[in-house]
Amino acid sequence: MFTNQQIYHVLIKQNILDKKQLDPILKQYEKEGKSLADYVLENKLLSEESLYQAIADGIDIEYTNLSEQTIRQDILFLVPEPIARTHDLIAFDQTDKGISIATTDPENIQTFDFLEKHLNKRLDIFLTSPAALETALAQYHRDIESAFENLTDKKTEQEGSHPRPLKELAQDVPIIRIVNTLLEYAIFESASDIHIEPGEKETIIRYRIDGVLREVMKLPRTAHSGIVARIKILSNLKLDEHRLPQDGRFKVETKEYKISFRVSILPIYDGEKIVMRLLNESNQRLRLADLGLNESQLEIVKTNVDKPHGMILVTGPTGSGKTTTLYAMMNTLNKPEVNIATIEDPIEYRMDRINQSQTNAKIEFTFAAGLRSLLRQDPDIIMVGEIRDKETAEIAVTAAMTGHLLLSTLHTNEASATLPRLIDMGVEPFLITSTTNLIIAQRLVRKICPHCISSYKINKDTLKQLEQRFDLDELMRVMAKQGAILSDKDDLTSLLFYKGTGCKKCHDSGYRGRIGIYEALAISEKIKESIMKRVPTEELRKIAVQEGMVTILQDGFMKAKSGVTTIEEVLRVSKE
């Protein structure tokens, strides 16, 4: 959107107000954080249409009035509705030379670049007013509702015919358009999951972006069966199966991206719910240095990854980035002189020169069975997607003892809880101590949006709440030791922390993207002695901290102090 300075210069240039009148108004509005455009409209100095025409002249861009234009359907749907609404733009004309885009934010270069590459045509950018754009955007719903009239049961009943076959329904232009829109917008917004949820009267579409679900669209209930059929065809699933869950997969590939969609269909009360996981296969392979580990943690991980045998376990709840960490380790280890083999459920990313296999419960190809087979494949390094049971745990430990480096994940909340968990599974303590090299616990936190980041100081009320829940003296000591603050004698209320105020680029959430917070527990002699004595988790944690382990919470606070994330986000994911 336009700054007050831009509008100020436009008003002066157009002789709408002179400098003497405008200077005190600008000063007041800057102080209150208000827009000069609001002042102009509230005091009826100009209509919205005239103001935006004046702005267009002032910044040397062509203006278009969309209020009374009817946009052709084929042009309108060049830009999916969610992208149009989120980024305040619309396609309204097309020639051999390019596509005309009207917007209220002509400085949104990132979105224009994306659309230009996606549409493979030059964009001509026009300015329009917010009211005119809103009127034009309403045409999406009119066109969708009109298209879906052909899909309703009423029409089939009036015609006295049977409901249309699902395969035919899935090939309807509006259904294809809606599914393509859902997929394209999810890719554009870097969503990790798409949820398509049938209700009694409508179908709700939600995306998980940066770990949080957000509703993006509601569709007529009559469209649901066609959408499900379309996705089943893409995923090569049974069209006529509505009572049993189904799992499938398909891929979307362009010059800009290669995305694999993992599809899960589950029958619920109102129909079939679809969840699609997006896996970006065109991403550059992640390096250990990109994960967000601090310097001391990164050094511990590198040291243990270089060991020729033993176990490295990554732990945390579902969706905490464990698999990504394992892939980053394998990327580091992936050299011509070693044989790396994996057993996964499912294979999330394809990696060159790594022998990846996927479990299949139907034919009893489990983690344990797969691991046994991998050991006969002359591997140097083995990655097991997850240790879920005693059998897998015992084979993994045996593999680590016999000269293999084994990487795997486990579901525990902290690093120190992993060792007692293995004992609970039935693995003998002496086997754990002789094979386990490193345990990493992790969470994913949302990063502060760089476009609306602002600093603040903790107030006394917040400080009291933190004091009741944490040992702040210990926290300050660790932060000082790690170089996050100058001295552990600093007052927490004197330190600057950061948050996002919310803007269009982050959908007013204040966050954009995610990064890991970690604790890395290297298995020392003292830890080994404690495991042999079967000490409880809390005691193991105390020993690890005494030996210098930075906890997830401490790592999170250091990232909050450096402006990467917020204190609230760290507390949310660490469940403290």
Image (cartoon, rainbow, N blue to C red):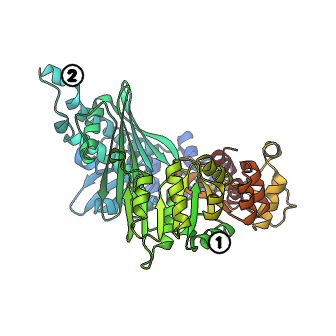
The three-letter amino acid code for the residue at tag 2 is Lys
From the image, tell me which residue sits under label 2: 154
Eyeballing the image, is 30 above or below 375?
Answer: above
Secondary element type, mark 2: helix
Between 144 and 100, the one lying in front of the other is 144
**Which residue was labeled with disc 1?**
299
Question: What amino acid is labelled 1 in the image?
Answer: Glu
Q: Is residue 210 visible?
A: no
**Helix, strand or loop status at disc 1:** helix
Q: Earlier in the sequence, mark 2 or mark 1?
A: 2
Quarter holding residue 274: top left
Judge from the rendering whether residue 293 lies leftward or rightward of residue 493; answer left or right: left
Where does residue 390 sit, x and y in percent of width and height? 53, 49
Residue found at x 50% / y 50%: 391
Picture residue at 80% right of the left edge, 60% below the top: 546
- 70 on left or right of 565: left
CA gap between label 2 and label 1 equals: 66 Å
Q: Residues within 10 Å of mark 1 (few under 14, many from 20)?
A: few
User: Farthest bottom residue?
Assistant: 337
Residue at (20, 31) in percent of width and height: 150
